[in-house]
Image: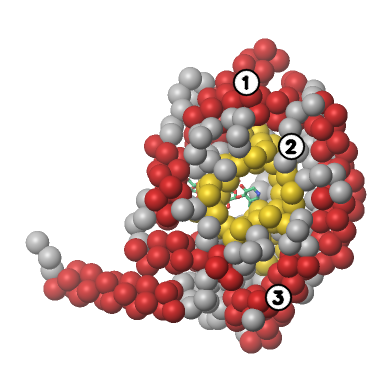
Amino acid sequence: MFSKKSAKAVSTAILMAGATTGFAQSIPSLKDTFKNDFGIGTALNNGQIEERDPAMTQLIVSQFNMATPENVMKSALIHPKWDTYDFVVPDKLVAFGKKHNIKINGHTLVWHSQLPSFIRGIHSKDSIQTFFNDHIKTVAGRYKDNIFSWDVVNEALNEDGTLRKTVFLDYLGEGYIAEAFRLTQQAAPNVELYYNDYNNEQPAKRAGCIELIKKVQASGARIDGVGIQGHWHVGRVPFKDIEESILQYSALGLKVMFTELDIEVLPRNFQGADVSQRMASNPSLNPYTAGLPDEVQKQLAADYEALFKLFLKHKDKVTRVTLWGVNDANSWLNGWPVRGRTNYPLLFDRNNQPKPAFYSVVALKK
Ligand code: G3I
């Protein structure tokens, strides 16, 4: 039975959904604004994939034409046991994409992080090779006709451009990267194949990334694009490095994508997105719980505007810009590198309303 209180909560929720839905329809659409330039993507979590909140679904489908699963296709979740795969939510993601005409970027086949726990018990080259082959064949094969692209290998580089020490490098040697591309191409011949990393716009890491790409190309395997994740900090976006990277990667014959864009506004003492790095909690690290000060909001809008201006300048080379989350409440940056913070890195606020940064980006096309 409905209590008075829950009935009121439901009607308020419906009103809010209606209001937000109406608003979402009346604001400009990012995907329409940039339809002749590049795809506009977002990262989706379980609730969004399962359409638990109608206002959220409305916002997603009105604003974005591409989507990346934030977690559900990572190996720990999609391949939890040696011979068990869990395709329930990934299948829903693919159905969501089909229903709403949103292209899906698979993320990710080979990554040292969020690996299934059984990997820790494997200590032979043969078994790692079997896991590697079976995982790629099974996952890429399942979605070969209904996803657009794969981040085949994610974050294989150190900051100095050398190869990161991972279970794959340890057991399979550096050839594992080209082999991942070869196996994915075999399992999913019509899907675009990318290498994806953070900070790979920085000169030293970029040089390593270029070397990595050239080795994949020299092996004869196909690689279609490179993803620059784009986890940057307000007031410190490295525009010059970004532009040089677009030019240098595209000179290799690759599509360039910004695959996990967000601009963090809170303090931290290192750059990048290595999820194993953390900082101790402390109130001075969470200064904007009551709202974002105007000057930071303005700087955020200016940074987003300058970034999209650069993307537009190189729209013949940049094929997709994906924001890492739909609104500020969803962002992983509320929980990392310090738990429980109030961050503001995206274009929509916690009530699904467009922020000044949204309007400054859209205004570039007026
Ligand atoms: O699902 C469990 C839940 O059962 C448990 O109760 C809860 C307790 O902590 O954790 C939940 O898992 C969390 C998961 O997100 C789903 O919310 C993990 O702890 C948490 O570590 C995980 O974080 C994700 C992170 O990758 C992990 O590597 C972030 O959501 C996700 O945004 C982030 O995305 C990565 C890209 O894949 C690669 N590039 C960097 C980027 C940002 O780190």
Residue at the image point whose x is 36% and y is 55% from the top? 51
> Where is residue 228 drawn, in percent x and y?
74, 53
Residue 108, labelled with which disc?
A: none
Disc 3 secondary structure class: helix
Q: Quadrant of residue 291?
A: bottom right
Q: Residues within 10 Å of mark 2 (few under 14, many from 20)?
A: many
Residue 133, labelled with which disc?
A: 1
Identify the residue under disc 3.
Answer: 305
Quick check: 276 left or right of 330? Answer: right
Lower position in the chain sequence, tag 3 or tag 2? 2
**Which one is closest to the eye, mark 2 or mark 1?**
2
Q: Is residue 109 above or below residue 119?
A: below
Gap between marks 3 and 2, in whole Å?
30 Å
Residue at the image point whose x is 82% and y is 50% from the top? 250
Residue 223, labelled with which disc?
A: 2
> Where is residue 118 drawn, in percent x and y?
55, 25
Q: Residue furthest left?
A: 1
**Which one is closest to the eye, mark 3 or mark 1?**
3
Lower position in the chain sequence, tag 3 or tag 1? 1
Lower position in the chain sequence, tag 2 or tag 1? 1
Gap between marks 3 and 1, in whole Å?
43 Å
From the Cβ of disc 3, is ligand 1 less than 8 Å away? no
Residue at the image point whose x is 46% and y is 62% from the top? 60
Q: Amino acid at mark 2?
A: Ile
Q: Is residue 53 above or below residue 366?
A: above
Disc 2 secondary structure class: loop
